[in-house]
Structure formats: structure tokens, C-alpha cells
Image: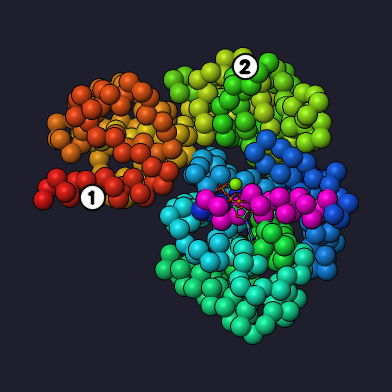
Amino acid sequence: TTEDPGELRTPIVAVLGHVDHGKTSLLDKIRGSAVIEGEAGAITQHIGATAVPLDVVSEVAGSLVDPTEFDLPGLLFIDTPGHHSFSTLRSRGGALADIAILVVDVNDGFQPQTEEAIRILKDTGTPFVVAANKIDTIPGWNPTEDAPVQQTYDNQSDRVRSQLDEALYELIGELSGAGFSSDLYWRVQDFQSNIGVIPVSAETGEGVPDLLTVLMGLAQRYMKSEMEVNIDGPGAGTVLEVKDERGFGTTLDVILYDGTIRQGDQIVVGGTNETIVTEVRALLKPRELAEIRTEKRFDDVESMQAAAGLKIAAPDLDEAMAGAPVRVVGDRDVEAVVEEVEAELAEVAVETAEEGVVVKADTLGSLEALANAMEEAEIPVMAAEVGDIAPRDVAMATTADDDKHRTILGFNVDVLGDAEQKAEDEDVRIFDSDVIYQLVDDYEEFVEERER
Ligand code: GTP
Ligand code: MG
């Protein structure tokens, strides 16, 4: 049945990069261009994601895309806020995203979260392209709204063009420093061995046609076989966030990357203490912006098919864990599915030592990335968990024999009020950061200073 194009899953595209480099603006632009093209209705807003169907991609891309060359249904974009690690987006054995767009401000170049994103892309082997954003901010820029790069390039003065070239070559140099060979996308023959750099402006839409064309081409050429899944089979997804929602209690924001989920389905969800088995009470999709003002914020839907972002309302979700797997049981044995989920959690379980530091992270995926970074830096870990820093974490840290291990490293988490006081009283050092490698560096610096 894989012959039927309807059976191909939508590729998942993660948009990542440093804070303020323009990830959300770029997605807004893609949506906005589609509105202008009169295709707005076709684009659907999901929880944490935006689905852009193939016909819209080809409308926006104009002459650059011939839709008859493609049979994938479109692209599902996931926006990741700069202060949130892309590592949340994990799935069984690796990255949830099939492809990524690394957004870099051409004037600003590589920044801490750019480097972090790139390390994770490397670790997970996720193919990516680089959107060199904000080209319109080059002094003297002469914009041509929504134009392909080559066309807008020709409309610039020599001075502007050489300034853009310079910025782009600097970026290519930084990518090379990070271990990736790259070039301007129109010079790239093999996108698997060479990263394509696409100059864009989320403000004017210049280069956006090129970006969509490259993504679609990449997905079609290299990812088609991975999209040949049974999208009618039991759903599989990853929890992005666990949230209280008025009228629904605790809900899960989920990216469904495989199969179908239906109202009433029995599901298995990874939890902080125990694996949760529950039943879907409602599947929720955000409503169009215009409708939100007057009515409910969500539409109840009967079922959803991969790839999609959705909110799941169900009983007993209080202890569900961000980054954990969600599985529809279907006609399988529930015990077997519980085992599958637990095996997947075990795969991420951090190896702990008798002696070491305590680490905390906001999601399972970020905990995994943090643990990997600790291992690389040869810093022993005594305890590793998902969640905010609580007094009992401080108590745990005090059991370390070596004073330099009386520390807690927290990634993207809050320090609960009484934990802070307790840490002060018990002489436990707390490090927190939004950047994993910053945490490791800070800790190493602390150790060095102590030993001086
Ligand atoms: P976080 O979600 O906080 O990580 O930021 P982000 O990467 O989503 O950046 P966002 O899209 O919010 O853009 C940050 C600022 O840059 C906003 O003020 C945008 O208007 C501006 N901006 C983004 N892209 C462009 C661009 O191409 N040109 C210009 N001139 N401004 C841009
Ligand atoms: Mg944003």
C-alpha cells in the first residue's frame, strides 16, 4: 500500500537556533505568504506545530517547485523557542525531527544556542539546512518581497552584495569550525555530505521560496522511504509538554510521528514514577485565531494521523513526563506496550555512579543530552532526573563525599524556593543554565578554581 501517496507520512521539520534569530518570524512568514496566495485555509495550526501541505509549498515556492515531482503530503514544522533545547524533540532511538532548519542571524553569526543545536544535530545525525536570516538588515538592502534569492541578489548594489557574501562566508567558516562542510545551497550537489546555506529574510520573504524548495527536495530525495509507514497503525508520539488546561485538567501536548490516535483509545505514557495507562478522553486541536476570541480555544477531533501536533486530554496524566513516549495500545497486549515504553525510557536512563553530582533537566530529551555532555566531560553523575530542583535534590547532593560533587546542575529548570535556602544552609552549589554546554563549562571552571 506504500504505492499510494496518501500513505506517506508528513516529514517533521524542526526549526531551531539562537534566541531572536527569527525562527517564529520565519514560520509566520511561511504562513503569511500562504495567506497572500489565498491558501490560508489549507495551512493548519497544530499544537506546537504548523502543517503546510504540498500545494501551499509549491504556491509559495513558485517556479522553483514542480509539484508533480513530489508525492509527500507536505511538511510539518515544529517551532522551538530559543530558550528551550531542541533535545526535547526526541523519539525512539534519536531525533523526532526528520530534518531541521538551523536559523542563524547573518549579522550575529553563531551564538551559544546555535552551537548547542548543532551539537545535537550532529549527535542525532539529523540532516539540516541553514537559513541565514535577516539579509534585509544589510545596510542599503533593496528588497523584493517574497522573491527567490537569485533574483533579489541581482537587485543589490555591488557593495551590498559583497557585504552579504562576506557574512555568508563567515557563516560557512563557522559551520566548518563545527565540523560541517557547507556551501550556498545552489552550489550543493549532495545535500547529505554538504550543508546547504540559504540566505533568507523572514521580514521580506526573500529566500523563503528557496528554503521551502530545498526542504521539499531533501525530504523527497532522502527521506521518502522513512515516510513509508503505516499511518493507519497504532499511534506513536512524544510528549512536548505537560500542561494544565482549564476544563480538561492535566493534558499532554504531543507530536504524533507515527500512526493514528483516536478518541477512546487506550494509551501508554512514560511517567516520572510509573508508566501511565489511560484512555483518551479528548483530542484537541487549536482553533483558527479568529474563532479563539469568542469561543472555546480548542476543537474536539475524532482522530489524528501522523505527523501532527495535538493535545491529549485523559485522566491520570499528572505524572506524565515531558519528552517521554506516548503509545496507542490498539489491538496489542497492553503489557507488551508498557514494556515497550519502559524499554524506551531505559534507553535514555542515565548511568549513575556512587559518587558524583546531581543533574536535573526539564525533559527526558534534555536530560539525555545533558547526561551525554557530562559523560563527554568525564564528570560523574550520582543522580539524574526530570523536574525542578527540590529540597530532596539538595539532600541528595549532600551525600557526596567529595566537596566538588556537592553540586546540582539544572538545565532549563526552576529552583524551588525552599531548595535555594536549603542549598545555602548545606553548602551545596547550584548551577543553572539554558545552555547545556554552558553548564558543563561553568562546573569545570568551578572545579578548577577550587583546585587552584
Ligand atoms: P525565540 O523564540 O525567542 O527564540 O526567538 P525567534 O528565533 O523565534 O525570533 P523571532 O522570530 O521572535 O524574531 C526576533 C526578532 O527579530 C523580532 O523582532 C523579529 O521581528 C525580528 N526578525 C526576525 N526575522 C527578521 C528578518 O528577517 N529581518 C528583520 N529585519 N527582522 C527580523
Ligand atoms: Mg520564537
Q: Position of residue 338 (x, y in %)?
A: 54, 23
Image point (47%, 62%), residue name: 110
Examine the rendered structure and indicate whether residue 150 appears above or below residue 260. below
Q: CA distance from mark 2 to mark 1?
A: 43 Å
Examine the rendered structure and indicate whether residue 137 appears above or below residue 411. below
- Quadrant hosting residue 127: bottom right
- In this rendering, does residue 181 appear at all? no
Image point (78%, 41%), residue name: 44
Image point (26%, 32%), residue name: 382
Query: Does residue 398 show up magenta in the picture?
Result: no
Out of 163 and 194, give the one closest to the viewer: 163
Q: Which residue is mark 1?
A: 445
Q: Secondary structure at mark 1?
A: helix
Please identify the quadrant where the N terminus is shown: top right
Which segment did they paint magenta?
Answer: 19-35
Q: Position of residue 71 (x, y in %)?
A: 80, 55
Q: Which amino acid type corresponds to the residue marked 2 in the rendered image?
A: Gly
Query: Does residue 32 show up magenta in the picture?
Result: yes
